[in-house]
Amino acid sequence: MTPPRRLLQWRPTLLIAGSERATMLALAVVAGIMAGFGAVAFRWLVEHATLLFSGQDDYAGTTDHPAHPWLPGLGGWFVVLVPVVGGLIYGPLVHRFAREARGHGVPEVMYAIQRKGGRIAGRVAFVKAIASAVTIGSGGSVGREGPIVQIGSALSSSLGRVTRIPGSQLPLLVACGAAGGIAATFNAPIAGVFFALELLLGSFAVGSFAAVVLASVTASVIARAILGNEAFLVLPELSVHHLAEYGLFVALGLLAGCVGIGFSKVLYWFEDMADKVWRGPEWLRPAAGGLLLGLLLLVLPQMYGVGYPVLENAVVGDYLVPFLLLLLVAKVIATSLTIAIGGSGGVFAPSLFLGAMLGAAAGQAIDAVAPGLGVSPGAYAVVGMAAVFAGSSRAPITAVLILFELTGEYSIILPLMLAVVVATATSSVLSRDTIYTEKLRRRGIDLTRHTSRTAGLAHVQVRELMAAAPPTLATGVLATTATRLILDAGRPSLPVVSDDGHYVGVVSASAAARALADDDDADDLVVADVSQWREHIGPDDTIDSVLDTMLDGSAPDGLPVLDDDGRVVGWLRHEVVLRAVATGAAT
């Protein structure tokens, strides 16, 4: 498949009072507006997809396995089929249009910010929104935060490229979109800010803070105006009555850190097993695996979708310890299975779910063993939510703030902070990676790798190492002619441009020859029929930021270098980059 061609024919340059900083702040507000409306629209999609597939506003909160109004004869057995139907919808959609929309989304945004200069294809926002809504609506046991982070980031990346902001500012604008998405989705503007700074940018620089805050506040205002201003969880009064409980919260933090890492390990074990077992077409994998998910939902309908009603019931004490532990194990399996088969959704909400089950079970057990302490199991459930998220993501500041904003409960802030710190430390001892960075490392991408020999590459721009632009091929040139021109140029491939000179991809000699050999109408083939999309870079990008793209194996003869108008101005070859790496890219 040839991805949609990018014809960058018109892109205005935005200047406000001649100030780059003012421009960035203005764009941050626009990014917040886009993320706010995007979050509202995505929430609407999820709600209506759930109603369509299950016949209920939230099937996880129902009792007695109600039948679908359209399929009364099946009774509760319809839940076996809906993940299969959902997989038949989102599987081909993701495979055909945006494979990066598969999975939980946050790692892809981290990679785009730290290694691709903030460049995310605009189509990802739309594919991710539909695929995730269908995944969750048809029973996928995943969360909304990963999708909205990727949606807001993709929209902001498109905004930055359309307005032609400096390449160095695009990652910040992408983080603004992510912050706005989190803020609007959870009505948590402060947590949105620190999610972007702590997890995505990895920096609390003053220059970044103002823009991210503006985006987060703007998105939150929009969401509150449309969805209302209510706390995520309405809880009874929670408190810590005895100093001895702080030792118990330390123990809870230790357990939560183990659960967070265990969740990550099981999730990726399921992915490995699915890769080994499945031998059919990739687009069909979600539907085939959906049958297993449906059987799990038949046994435990509480695993349907995000599961917020079940989480609330656990916090207020509606479940006993054995059932809480069963729900904890089942959620790990359900979420891992959903993502392993190709589902699209986040892992933040499942982390909160696991923490609530763990904390509520611990609180009830402590109350049974030592009733004299007068513990509040709900307090342990809330603390467990933050601690498991911290253990899986290793983002302690975000964990503390987001639980405070989600619940509006300040009385347990001290044990909350204590357990989060302990969980984060435990997680660091048990595993090098978080649930987000593990996904990237499994692809051979280490966001912490470029520290010594390649550190100097952060100051070397592509224009300093790129070669002159090679000859280009127009889309209408016959494939037979293109093959000859490629061979005459002595290159494996040549860039393809539209009639007005804008880059649309590359055509390789091997691809052209294969098409000519296999097609009965070979004489009529043109370059547009055999061209393929290849990532491009800009002359102002740093070598450090494009290194992973250069070395991921998708471009064996190098990458085209495009100017702001989308025209090929150079070519960056592997041997030049490797020579720079080998010599440490002397400054």
Image: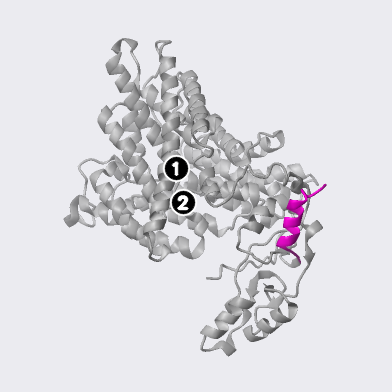
Residue 433 in view in this figure: yes
Residue 448 point in image, percent of width and height: 63, 42
Q: Is residue 571 magenta?
A: yes
**Picture disc at residue 308:** none
| Residue displayed at 55% across by 50% down | 108
Residue 402 in view in this figure: no
**Could you tell whether 426 is left or right of 217 in the image?**
left
Question: From this viewpoint, which residue is outermost toward the front?
Answer: 582
Which residue is labeled 1 in the image?
A: 347
**First along the sequence among labels 2 and 1:** 2
Q: Which residue occupies the foreground of this view, 257 or 382?
A: 257
Which residue is labeled 2 in the image?
A: 103
Magenta segment boundaries in residue numbering: 570-587
**For residue 57, above or below residue 6:** above
* Total numbered labels placed on residues in the image: 2
User: Would you identify the image quadrant in which residue 3 lies?
Assistant: bottom right
| Residue displayed at 44% across by 25% down | 253
Q: Which residue occupies the foreground of this view, 25 or 467?
A: 467
